[in-house]
Image: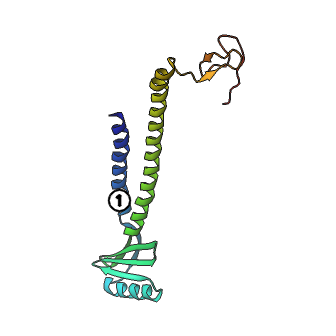
Amino acid sequence: MDMLFVCLTPIVIMTIAIILIIIIASKKHLMTVVPNREINSFRMEALQKFRNKDFKIKEKGDKIYIEKGTFTATNIFLIQKNDKIEIYRQNSATTITWILVVVGAFFFLILALVVGIISDSNSKNFAENEILPLLTGKHFSDRICPRCKKDIPFDAEICPYCGNRLQTYI
């Protein structure tokens, strides 16, 4: 049950984070306002300028998708308000996809680390607390005193049996 909770908690948190990233990344951002212009003529001029730069262009409704290269793209929105045009940008699906890929990779690295640490800890506890006593009849000790050869606690700085000062490696 604990392992299930440990695995599902990051997945739930990551799902919420991905939803928030999509909402934030897909928001329209006002870039500028062009006064005293009519949207159709401005749109035609803008499209001509984009074509002269050899950008890939796709039009859909009030949105113009402009792509410069594989990883460089944006959506531009032209909105007429009275006698001015507002120009908005919105992150493209390419940008959002790369954000999700990076966040997902980071998430799965963390998940792999957590699962690895838990499974290593469970294996160590199983070996020390169940297998070793079964084989030898005594419990595992993290350290043995080099002078008197008795089992001592791992964090001991002085042997409780012979008084030998022990080396610490921390």
- Is residue 92 in view? no
Question: Residue at 47% across / 50% down in the picture?
Answer: 109
Residue furthest to the top = 161
Judged left or right of residue 102, residue 64 is left
Judged left or right of residue 148, residue 15 is left
* Identity, as a three-letter code, of the amino acid under mark 1: Ile
- Is residue 101 in view? yes
Quarter of the figure with residue 96: bottom left
Question: Residue at 44% across / 24% down in the picture?
Answer: 130
Task: Report crowding for label 1: few under 14, some 14 to 19, many 20 or more residues within 10 A (C-alpha).
Answer: some
Q: In which quarter of the image is the C terminus?
A: top right
Q: Horizontal and vertical percent for residue 125?
A: 47, 28
Q: Number of marks in the image?
A: 1
* Viewer-side residue, 48 vs 99: 99
Q: Horizontal and vertical percent for residue 168?
A: 68, 26
Q: Horizontal and vertical percent for residue 124?
A: 49, 31
* Viewer-side residue, 9 vs 127: 127
- Rendered view: 26 above or below 5: below
Judged left or right of residue 77, residue 148 is right
Q: Quadrant of the N terminus?
A: top left
Which residue is labeled 1 in the image?
22
- Helix, strand or loop status at disc 1: helix
- Rendered view: 108 above or below 94: above
* Viewer-side residue, 167 vs 108: 167
Quarter of the figure with residue 56: bottom left
- Rendered view: 8 above or below 54: above
Question: Residue at 37% across / 73% down in the picture?
Answer: 75
Question: Residue at 45% across / 75% down in the picture?
Answer: 70
Q: Horizontal and vertical percent for residue 50?
A: 43, 84
